Amino acid sequence: MPGWCARFMENRVALSGSRAEARRMTHISHIGVMSPKRGPLTPAQKMNAVLPFSKRPPCPACGATTLLRTRKIDSEVFWGCSTYSKCSGSIPIDPKKFKAAYDALEAAARR
């Protein structure tokens, strides 16, 4: 039976489709964890770390890649343009669907 680290990497490979993409996602997910100034990752940051770019919708305004972002006013999650400040395109997300996807991710990480 593989340890938690091996199972974690297997889940990442299964989600991303390649070992190289899984390593990139692992590096990204550790950026927030390694820095004592940043604190724990938010659900949107965790989903960004494991969701491959091929599964993200393009920005409706400019066509760039989108990232999951959290609105400060009401803590709602939405797809926001990765080139924010140059482009303010966004796509709303149904909170129930996001919660279901996040819960599935957490369950997969616990296995």
Image (cartoon, rainbow, N blue to C red):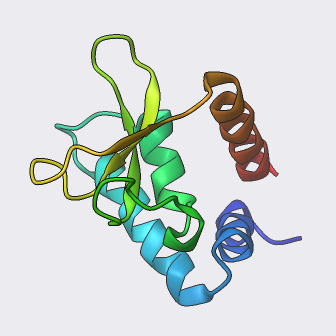
- Residue at point 66%, 38% (across, down): 102
Percent coordinates x, y for residue 27 in the rendering: 39, 69
Q: Please state if 108 lies on the left or on the right of 84 as rendered.
A: right
- Residue 33 x, y percent position in the rendering: 35, 48
Relative to 71, residue 82 above or below: below
For the residue pair 67 and 106, the one nearer the viewer reads as 67
Towards the viewer: 28 or 93: 93
- Where is residue 48? Give x, y as percent: 46, 53
Residue plotted at (89% across, 70% down): 1
The residue lying toward the viewer, choosing from 14 and 86, is 86
Can you tell which quarter of the image residue 98 is in? top right
Residue ranking furthest to the left = 85
- The residue furthest top is 74
Q: Residue at x 30, y 54 (%)?
A: 61
- What x and y, as percent, mark residue 8? 67, 64
Residue 60 vertical position relative to residue 1 in the rendered view, above or below: above
